Amino acid sequence: MQHDQRQATNPGAAPLGYTAAVELSSDRLVNNKRQKAKSSRPAAGGSRFKLGGKKEEAERQRKLDLIRTPVLSCYRIAVISLKGGVGKTTTTTALGSTLATERQDKILAIDANPDAGTLGRRVRRETGATIRDLVQAIPHLNSYMDIRRFTSQASSGLEIIANDVDPAVSTTFNDEDYRRAIDVLGQQYPIILTDSGTGLLYSAMRGVLDLADQLIIISTPSVDGASSASTTLDWLSAHGYADLVSRSITVISGVRETGKMIKVDDIVGHFQTRCRGVVVVPFDEHLSAGAEVDLDMMRPKVREAYFNLSAMVAEDFVRHQQSHGLWTSDGNPPPVAAPPMPGQSTPGQPYPPQPQPGQPVPGQPVPGQPYPPQPGQPYPPQPGPGAGQQPYPQPGYGQQQPYAQPGYGYPQQGQPGQPGQQGQQAHPGQPGQPGQPGQAPPPPPQQ
């Protein structure tokens, strides 16, 4: 009997793992009443981090301004590591939740782990759809609401797209599928985080690295964790991603409590020579539970660490804008207006509209139609009706009136014209005015 060829006995049932995610939720398994009482929501419009004096508050405000930098083109963040169990999924969720909270923007996290990723278990599941379902529905995705049916949203505002927990199914998500998904999702989400797998050679990893604007390497405060993270950087540098490595950030994640045997400062110093920055995240009991991530339940130092990580990521937004032509070279803020579409002028420069084939050019007369006069100029003479044609009707009078001759303007409605004054000739046929319907207007006076 070939077990790998067996089919699902109930194709219409919920996806594998979805029932467990709903029934074995954090609300049921985690005792969070004590931690919940310690935290409180920040005031509307402000950040949740307000620690220290004036100097610390000014530095926090500077980082907050960086985090809230406008992103006019999709910014893609890849979280990778060769070693499993080091906190990739935790970092992806916590970083995405911090960005979503501080930016008040649409932030998306994708589970691209081919080995039954667990990103879908870090938020309350709202749908059983996975990234594979979204790829199959790409031809029918035309708006944000179409995509929203495939995502689950956390309390912070972060949205996630889960992956299949069945390894036999999740491996079908390959490089081409990832690129197609990013192409569609990048039109709706300014920032996308990708939780990758433990390997670097599976199919979708090629697209993750090629499309990444920011790389986050996860390490642990341990000998094997730091060695695996450094080996990851070596492999990337040797395979054409040296520039991405130089802009990368290393996160030393305290996924478990460690003593004083490990010299964490030496690990930090090593990665500071290889990456753009290093952030140390202390151990947190809430994160180690593997439950739904809630920023309010984290320790203040842990929340501050992810806040600093968000600010460090945001420091690369300027370079990203410049590389896409959406930021000025001197680092000034982006234009208020949206970037131009291909073929149009840049903001601030007029661009004359090009007529379509078969359409008249603006400002040019159309054959067979009268040319409208310019402001302050009288109407030009129009040719009279030919034989068998009726004169043009004038709206509002109910009688057929010919066009006025040069030098004779129309009087205002309700004001009779004064005969003998140029430009004040009254309409013939009006009540109280000379002339009968069907008669030609009187000849103009001699100058």
Image (spheres, helix red, strand yellow):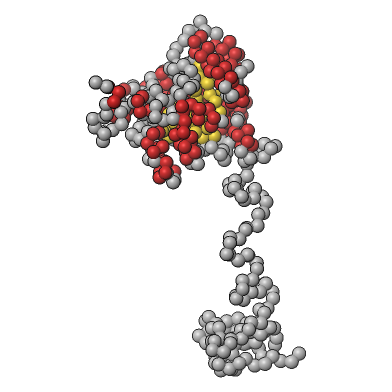
Q: Does the rendering let one see residue 152?
A: no
Picture quadrant where residue 384 is located: bottom right
The structure residue drawn at horizontal position 44% and vertical position 14%, both measured from the top left corner, is: 256
Give the side of residue 366 with respect to residue 18, left or right.
right
Q: Determine which quarter of the picture holds residue 437.
A: bottom right
Q: Residue furthest top?
A: 261
Of 156 and 270, the residue lying toward us: 270
Q: Is residue 39 above or below residue 73?
A: above
Q: Quadrant of the N terminus?
A: top left
- The picture places residue 194, in percent across and down from the top left corner, at 47, 29
How many marks the image carries: the answer is 0
Image coordinates of residue 446 in percent, x first then y, are: 74, 92
Residue drawn at x 54%, y 25% as measured from the top left: 215
Image x and y of residue 386, in percent? 58, 87
Compared across the picture, whether 263 is left or right of 7 comes to: right
Q: Is residue 299 above or below residue 107?
A: above
Q: Is residue 275 above or below residue 191?
A: above
- Outermost residue to the right: 447
- In depth, the one of 243 and 322 nearer the eye is 243
Residue 308 vs residue 88: left or right?
right
Q: Examine the rendered structure and indicate whether residue 302 appears above or below residue 417.
A: above
Q: Residue at x 69, y 74 (%)?
A: 376
